[in-house]
Amino acid sequence: MKTLDRVKNIATPFVFGVLFLALWESAVNGFDLKPYFLAAPSKIMEQFLNNTTRIWEATAVSGSNALVGLVIGTILGIAMSFILSRFRFLSQLITPLAISLNAIPIFVLVAVLNNMYSITSEIPRRFMVTLVVYFIVLVNVARGLTQVSSIQVELMRSYAASEFAILRKVRVPNAIPYLFTALKVAAPASVITAFVSEYFGGLQNGLGSRITSNIANSKNAAAWAYVLGACLLGLAFYTVSIILESLTRKGQTK
Amino acid sequence: MFAMTLALLVAFWELYKAIGPQDGGMMFGVRVLPRANDTAMPHVSTMFSRYGRPEVRGSDKKIWIVVLSGAWFSLRLSLVGFFLGTTIGIGLAVLMARFTTVRRGLLPYLVMSQTVPLIALAPLVVSWGGKLEIGSFVWPRWLSASILGTFLAFFPVAVGTLRGLTSSPLAAVELMSSYAASWRQTLFKLRFPAAVPFMVPALKLGASGAVVGVVVAEISTGLKGGIGRLIIEYAREATGDPAKVFTAVFGAAALGLTMSGLVAFFDLFLMRNRPRETST
Amino acid sequence: MSAVVNTSAVEVAGASKIFNEGTANQVDALLDVNLTIAPGEFVSLIGPSGCGKSTLLRLIANLLEPTQGAISVNGKTSAQSRLDQDYGMAFQQAGLFDWRTVSKNIELPLELKGWDKKKRAVRAAQMLELVKLEEFGNMYPWQLSGGMQQRVAIARALAAHPPLLLMDEPFGALDEMTREYMQGELLRICAETSTTVVFVTHSIPEAVYLSNRVVVMSPRPGRILEVIDVNLGSKRSELTRAADGFFRSITSVREALRGTHADHVASTAIRGVEDR
């Protein structure tokens, strides 16, 4: 029964995907849809394979923006969360800020950042990604450091353990799964933010700008090919964060 | 507390202006620290006083009115996107809860879609505006912005609602079965009410998704009337009028807060009779 | 339906239940169970963990189908009984809906049967009186104690006045004193409504105090070992708990349960059955 379920779990989405693509292809050809509306999957694939180098270059630009922001944001977020766990009153200041920032499209700050730096710099985009990732990591890791089982803390106190020892032996191990929860959200978010930041002008060498320029030139299939590249980038980031998570879970049952 | 945070932020901003390098700081040949002069970083007081002045020299329209109407325009688009996205999301979740095959086939894509930058589709969806005609219905340009909001809203709503619909304890389902209740009755009397605590955070994500979708669409097309376009326009005039762009940025922030405030209000209503969660 | 008038409330004939037949996970839960319950009787099912008592209850409730044999309730098949709503059910977890008031929880089966608003409200109020919770109609389940929640669950189970009540360890999660109180209340309610009851429990004293007959079951695969008549009369009270007959019946049940281990040289304690 179990293996049959597993087979079904993999086969069904696969079949759905294939059916969807087939429908798409036949709809475009059958209804003779104008290319500016929807391009056929076959054409998209064709464009993708023709332009692999250029797609890769653009992906590298957007991807590096996302990556730099992701790494720096994570490091800063972790550092700040330690500070927050030590000085609890700070969390009362920062948490409402983090919650409201969730609701706001803060990427619009890129417009401001472009002025604060020169227009030809990648820094505004990386800054933006850093900011977004920072808050995600901060909120989650801080929660992991502070929401520990009170029984464990009491035990450590009964051993007259220092706050630092409690940090090392109880809080940090507790916080590790929270870090990875944060990364699973932050990784795609970094890609998305890097993307959106490109719409505010500045250097036009990333995926986002390529898509817009291809559409402006009515090369829709090419634009879709770049979209495909973007999706692959996002998936790659997410997959890496999942792999990293599984590395730390060796021997642990969920 | 929140006011204190804001005050701290303002203080931080002004402090940097006071001591920061006028032309920015270089590190490894790359300007890492932003410029602190008045053109790049206007004083906070300038930002606020800017609201009181007219938008364009010689015009009568005060800028706060312009920003407010831009935010209002975008808010309405976001609401449309949110409602569409929520309806489709809930409908899809019900379908997936009912038919295991559909759930198996679609759920992986739904989960994947949250990791993929759907934003990338923005220029494409937006390009449909003005060029598409279905019968006598001409696709208005603003609809593309709402549709992008719908895209971004419906995925988290569908996933969250599905989790909620399947969260009922077995004993409760058995109870309904012992009443010989139909699937539809079980859906409305058990599964949906039990799903509400799961739908609440999903709706929040949907709301912010709708806002992001709409704003991004406005930015990539320069949709007339929206707050996105205002941001881009004012950013271009930043050398001459540095505080202007901030007015629009604050407007966008207000938009996001209003949207999430509306949803939070609705959430309170949904959860009004539930036991309060005790925070540890 | 057959023309033969069936006077029993529940009839289990040669019922067996096997889960995952033919696979490595096969579980022989019940084997050839025969049981007849007369209307108005209170019958308890007791046995060690895994003896299939809950499974038997679910067969009667038509939440499971027997692998072999037949079950009839009120002269109909168990499936038809479920569709006709001939029984009410109560579980260990009260299973009340958090988002409904106490009254609305009681009205749930009536809503599903299509009763109109007024009738439902009247019946709900009657049931609240029956379980002595008249003041609590507009409160929410989480505002009530465990014992009170169970009383609401019983009120709900009896709301449509079914002739049969099926209960799966409903008092298992309550403390001892509340438990004894609830047992008294249950007897009073069932006497007032003349309901037939099939009651699954882990507790020997509880089974003896409540029942006319106690059905002792064997460990897996579940079979009926013995059916013990409890002759304590129909009017039971706190005094009953101190009566000689009470202790005699408890001893009979205990011996019947221990009897399953008679073949074992080293007799071990029976798992999963309380002796208090």
Image (cartoon, coloured by chain):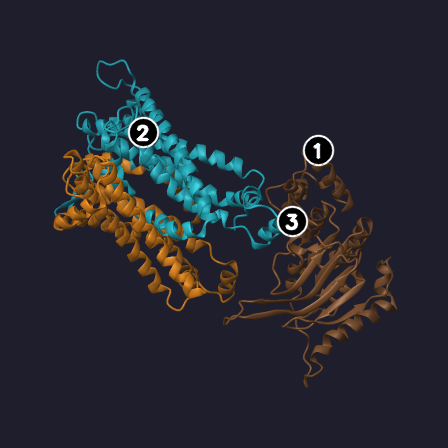
Chain colours: A orange, B cyan, C brown
- In this image, C193 relative to A35: left or right? right
Residue assigned mark 2: B143
Real-space CA distance between mark 1 and mark 3, rounded to the nearest whole angstrom = 24 Å
The residue located at (87%, 66%) in the rendering is C243
Q: Badge 3: few (under 14), some or many (20 or more) residues near its Cα, within 10 Å? A: some
Q: Amino acid at mark 2?
A: Leu
Q: Farthest residue in the bottom direction? A: C265
Q: Are marks 1 and 2 in contact (CB under 8 Å)?
A: no
Q: Can residue A81 be seen in the rendering of this structure?
A: yes
Q: What chain is tagged by disc 1? A: C
Q: Amino acid at mark 3?
A: Leu
Q: Are marks 2 and 3 in contact (CB under 8 Å)?
A: no
Q: Identify the element where label 3 is drawn.
A: helix
- In this image, A52 relative to A77: left or right? left
Q: Which of the 4 image quarters holds residue B233?
A: top left
- Dot 1 or dot 3: first in sequence order is 3
Q: Are marks 1 and 3 in contact (CB under 8 Å)?
A: no
Q: Nearer the viewer, residue B87 or B35?
A: B87
Q: Badge 2: few (under 14), some or many (20 or more) residues near its Cα, within 10 Å? A: some
Real-space CA distance between mark 2 and mark 3, rounded to the nearest whole angstrom = 49 Å
Real-space CA distance between mark 1 and mark 2, rounded to the nearest whole angstrom = 48 Å
Q: Can residue A89 be seen in the rendering of this structure?
A: no
Q: Identify the element where label 1 is drawn.
A: helix
Q: Identify the element where label 2 is drawn.
A: helix
Q: Position of residue B95 (x, y in %)?
A: 45, 45
Residue assigned mark 1: C118
Q: Position of residue A42 (x, y in %)?
A: 20, 47
Please tell me if label 1 and label 3 are on a single chain: yes
Q: Nearer the viewer, residue A164 or C98?
A: C98
Q: Badge 1: few (under 14), some or many (20 or more) residues near its Cα, within 10 Å? A: few
Residue assigned mark 3: C83
